[in-house]
Image (tube, grey):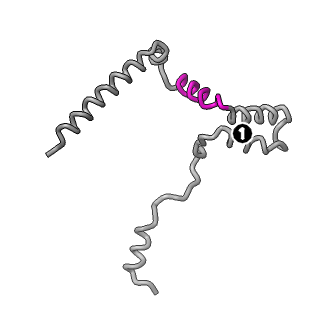
Amino acid sequence: MPSPRTRRTSTVSVPNRSPSTGRPPPRTNSAGGATRRFASRDRFAPPEAITRLREVERLTRDDDFERLRTAARARSELSDEERDRLARGDVTDELERAQERKDTLSDALDEYPSR
C-alpha cells in the first residue's frame, strides 16, 4: 500500500486538464501534402474535384510556387501602403541603409570591444 505522501505526489504531477488532440488541427506548410491527402479520398469526392486537387498538387511542385506563395502571403499580410512602398523600391532602400548602419555598429564593436 503506497504511503499518503506517495499518493499526494502522484496527484500533484497529473495535469488538471483533459487530454486533447487540438482543434483545429495544426497548419501544415505543405500545400502539396494537404492536397495529396484530399486527392486520395477519391471515393468521397466527385471526379472533377479530384482532378482540380491533383492540379493544385502539381502546382506545388512547380518552381514558381514559392514566388506565388510569397506574393499571396504579402497580399494578405501587407497593407496597401506597405505594398506600394515595396513596389516603389522604398523598402529596398531602407534595407540597404539599415544594413549600412548594422555594418557601422559591427565595425565599432570590433574596434572597441567591451572591457
- Is 68 one of the magenta-colored residues? yes
User: Residue at 27% across / 35% down in the picture?
Assistant: 106
Residue at the location (71% across, 39% down)? 35
Closer to the camera, 52 or 1? 52
Element class at badge 1: helix
The x, y position of residue 75, in whole percent, is 55, 22
Query: Residue 40, percent across and down?
Result: 78, 45
Compared with residue 79, is residue 38 higher up or lower down, i.e. above or below? below
Task: Identify the residue at image location x=17%, y=43%.
Answer: 114
What's the amino acid at mark 1? Thr
- Left or right: residue 41 versus residue 24 is right
* Magenta highlight on residue 72: yes
Furthest-bottom residue in this view: 1
Q: Name the residue: 40% across, 84% down.
A: 3
| Nearest to the observer: residue 20 or residue 79 | 79
Quarter-of-image position of residue 31: top right
Magenta stretch, overall SS: helix
Quadrant housing residue 51? top right
* 67 is higher (above) or lower (below) than 86: below
Q: Residues within 10 Å of mark 1 (few under 14, many from 20)?
A: some
Q: Which residue is mark 1?
A: 35
Residue segment shown in magenta: 63-76
How far from the left and from the top, in percent, is residue 77? 50, 26
As drawn, is 29 to the left or to the right of 82? right
Is residue 60 toward the left or the right of residue 41 in the image? left
Instruction: Please state which of residues 51 and 58 is positioned toward the viewer in this rendering.
Output: 58
